Every structure is written in C-alpha cells, then in structure tokens.
Image (tube, helix red, strand yellow):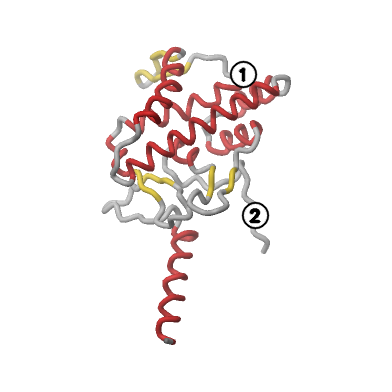
Amino acid sequence: MQKKKKHAGNLSLLGGRPCLDFVNTLDWRGSDQPQEFLETYPDLIAWSRHAGTISRQPAGRITQRSKSQLSKQTRVLNKAIQLRESLYRIFSALADGNAAANKDLETFNKFFSRTMINSKIVKTPDGFKWAIEEDQANPEWILNPLIRSAADLLISKDLKRVKKCGDPACGWLFLDTSRNRSRRWCDMRDCGNRAKASRFYKKKMAKRK
C-alpha cells in the first residue's frame, strides 16, 4: 500500500496543544533537510482547518477575501513563520530546562498585544469565555487562535510537560500527558520505532565484531 504523501492538511497532530502542532509544521528541524509544510498562505488555511483552529465558514471567508490580496497573503504567511519560529525557540528552550530568550518573548508579546486589543470576555451558557472580536475574513485573523493557545500554555501548569522528541533530527514538540511523564517520542510508531530499529542494528553489528 502506497504511503500517503504528507501535506499541511493531513499532518499528524501529536503536540497536544494547537500552538505545539503549529510549531511542528516544520518537520525534521535537526536534519540537513528540514521539510516546510507552510509554503503558501493556502497551506496555512488548510493546516488551520485540519487542526481545528478555524471552522469551515471563517476559512471560506478568509479564502475568498485573500484571493484578491496576494501581497497580504505573503505578509501574513511571513508573520505566521515568524510567530512559529519564536514559539519553537521559546518552548524548545523550556523543554531543555533553559530560559526562553527575551528577544523571542518580545516577539511573541507583540503578537499577543495585538490579539488582546481585539479581545473581550463574553457570556456563555456555562459562564464566560475569551472571544477575539475581529473580522474573521481578515487573512491575519487566522493567527489569533494560535497566539491564544500559546499564551494559555505559557501560563499554565502544563508548561512543565512540554517535551522535545527524543530523535534530535525530528525536533517536534509535544505535551507529555503520561502519568509518570515518561514519553520520549513524538510518535512511538515513527521516531520511536526508528530508534528501536537503530539500537537493534547497532547491537547486532557489535556482536559480529
């Protein structure tokens, strides 16, 4: 059976939070040939729909409006990459037990401040929620749920559960929700099995010497 080609609209969502899945849209960060899945603005829309950070109707409105705003598509995509890379450096540093760089926090706070300006608390049947009151047809609106996700994670107790895949070439981040916090791989069936096969091969070769 032919393996399904990976693209923005079918990437594995293993991060445990939208912001971590967003960071993982660049694959094989630690390798000589990292793979970019957000090459165009439509890729960003496709990923957002796949990840559930925007619903069908806002995605349709954004798609229609952005068709006549090609230069804005490029600007928003560049902002998305800037946001993603600053989040990667922040969460990666924390996962390694280091402090996040002030420069990266400043970059994120610029995104966050803009989102807060357009946000308010609204009533719901169950209480209240944080709503982002901005034109959902604005191509840049697509970043807001990711900014909120990152802000929520940064101030939550779950921040200590952010880990980096045990395969240095992979570089994916995830939230370790295992009871004893023993998860090592983004996916045991992928990176985990590859590491297991590598250990088996090395052990086999050592016995031949």
Considering every residue shown, the one lying at the far bottom of the view is 208
- 90 to 64, vertically: above or below: below
Q: State which tag comes first along the sequence, 1 or 2.
A: 2
Q: Residues within 10 Å of mark 2 (few under 14, many from 20)?
A: few
Image quadrant occupied by the N terminus:
bottom right
Residue at 44 percent of width and 87 percent of height? 208
Q: Is residue 132 above or below residue 108?
A: above
* Cα distance in 3D space between marks 1 and 2: 32 Å
- Residue 2: where, in percent of width, then height? 68, 61
Task: Name the amino acid type tagged 1.
Answer: Ala
In this picture, is 164 found above or below 119? below
Query: Percent position (x, y) of residue 206?
Result: 41, 81
The picture places residue 106, in percent across and down from the top left corner, at 39, 25
- Kindly identify which residue carries mark 1: 137
| Residue pointed to by mark 2 | 4
What SS does tag 1 mark?
loop
